[in-house]
Image (tube, grey):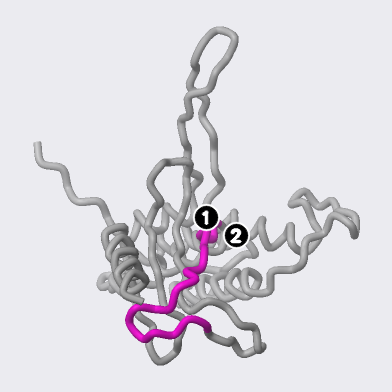
Amino acid sequence: MKHEAADPLLTVVDKLTKPTFKHLWVDTPEGKRVRTVEHPALLRQLEDAVTASMGNDGRSKSTSAMERNMLDSEALFEFLRIKSQIGDWCRLRDVQPTRDPVQDLRAWHVAHIGQSRPQDDFYVEQLRGWVGIIRARLDPPKRFEITQPCPVCGVAEVMDADGLVSKAVVVEYRDYGTSTPIRPRAVCRNALCQAVWDGLEAIEELGDELREKASGQ
């Protein structure tokens, strides 16, 4: 039996507004058991992160000054921007927005799909962009710098707007406890170069180039 393709708009709305569940094997006195871990919706996670950074534990209890994290202004900006955009979309569909972006986005989706020509592609692209932004904010990649010069432009160090000097080539990846790095990517931060090595094979090629240049010196 042929199944219909999943609705891309609903799929990405769900990613932002529904919790996810992971099933993990854990050791217990009775042996290995499966434990289910619930992760809040992405929008809720971003909201909780902003709330925590402002000195609130998410349950209306203020933390002490010593326990407060510095306010992540970029996360706050992204949350307010997303929340404002959802509110605008709601008003375009005659939906009265609340102060809850999760509730508002789902209410907007219901009103939106009732339109004769909803133009989903634009919204799918916007929502996927939000998913990427939130995941990058909540789970920033690990990174390390390459001490050798960039094999493309030959620059070894760069200076940022604040006058801080760092190595030109930086490798970013995600580590989820596996032996293989997830989504590795290397970039040259020289503004006149900006070479990119995307993926494990490209990173391996970068390593080969660096070794060849080092051996040729």
87 displayed left or right of 190: right
- Give the class, few, some or many, for how many residues have Cα within 10 Å of label 1's Cα (few <14, many ≥20): many
Q: Position of residue 61 (x, y in %)?
A: 84, 51
Which residue carries the number 1 mark? 42
Q: Residue at x 72, y 60 (%)?
A: 51
Q: Position of residue 59 (x, y in %)?
A: 77, 48
Q: Residue at x 41, y 42 (%)?
A: 179
Q: Residue at x 62, y 75 (%)?
A: 77
33 displayed left or right of 199: right
Q: Position of residue 144 (x, y in %)?
A: 52, 63
Which residue carries the number 2 mark? 46
**Residue type at mark 2?**
Leu
Q: Residue at x 37, y 57 (%)?
A: 183
Element type at marker 2?
A: helix
Q: Quadrant of the C terminus?
A: bottom left
Element type at marker 1?
A: helix
**Residue type at mark 1?**
Leu
**Which stretch is magenta?**
139-157
What kind of secondary structure does the magenta stretch mostly adopt? Answer: loop
Q: Quadrant of the N terminus?
A: top left
Q: Are marks 1 and 2 in contact (CB under 8 Å)?
A: yes
Out of 54 and 174, give the one closest to the viewer: 174
**Residue 193's image quarter?**
bottom left
- Tell me, yes or no, whether the highlighted magenta stretch contains residue 68: no
